[in-house]
Image: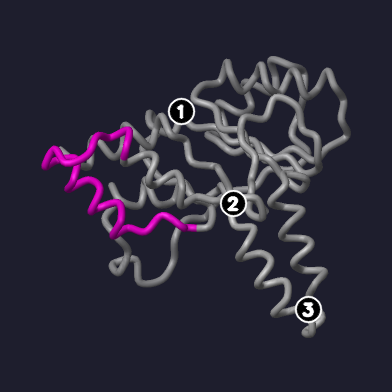
Amino acid sequence: MTHTLHRQGDVESLREDYIVLILGKDIPFSPYRMHFSRRFPRIYGIVKKAFLSLGILRMLRTIRRIGSGETHQCPVFNDKKELATYLKGLKERNLGKSVVVSGLFDGVIDCLREINLSPHTIQFSLGIFGKTELLPKKEVLEITTMCGHHMISPMLVEKLASDIKNGEISSEQAVRVMGKQCVCGVCNKTRLSKLIEALAK
């Protein structure tokens, strides 16, 4: 199961949003790497000492391994051509890694056919169940669901949209703020910029 299946938006918007999740280390071509332990070395050290006696040092080592980019990487693409080129490169290298591609089915399948590949498994997002009336409005969800762990707060999105509307910040600055919240790096910043500008109008 991938954490990138929850993205929302209309078809035209989602046609500019493809994510590749790769398990393993030393993945080529990847523009995104996670740096948990490098960003917060002091915090990591304090937590390590605090929990050492509780026997979860192994968990902390796993977090550090994730932070160094050894576990997974998530390049994001804006169109099918970029995606096809990337996947073709992975196929030629024959790395033996697990690769998950998220996006509209027709776009992903077209790319796979172009490079003579077929999917091993296909997963569907069945939508949202429960008291959906408690959710933020659709335009905000299109932004917050771009982070697979929902680390971009709806209130932050609305505040940034208001700041853009009032001329206090630019959409590029808003995108940088929101992008920092998504530690898994699966936010499509090009699409994010378009959505926050539309919300600010």
Q: Disc 1 designates what residue?
A: 15
In front: 39, or 176?
Answer: 39
Q: In the drawing, does residue 103 fall left or right of residue 192?
A: right
Residue 73 locus on image (x, y percent): 68, 40
The scheme the figure's colours follow is one colour
Q: Is residue 89 magenta?
A: no
Q: State the quadrant of the N terminus.
A: bottom right
The residue under label 3 is 52
Q: Which callout, 1 or 2, points at the residue further toward the start of the chain? A: 1
Disc 2: which residue = 39
Q: Are marks 1 and 3 in contact (CB under 8 Å)?
A: no
**Residue type pointed to by label 2:** Arg
Which corner quadrant of the image does residue 59 belong to?
Answer: bottom right
- Left or right side of 163 for 134: right
Looking at the image, is mark 1 or mark 3 nearer the viewer? 3
What's the magenta region? 150-173
For the point 58% across and 18% down, the residue is: 82
The answer for how far apart the CA atoms under marks 2 and 3 are is 21 Å
Q: Residues within 10 Å of mark 2 (few under 14, many from 20)?
A: few
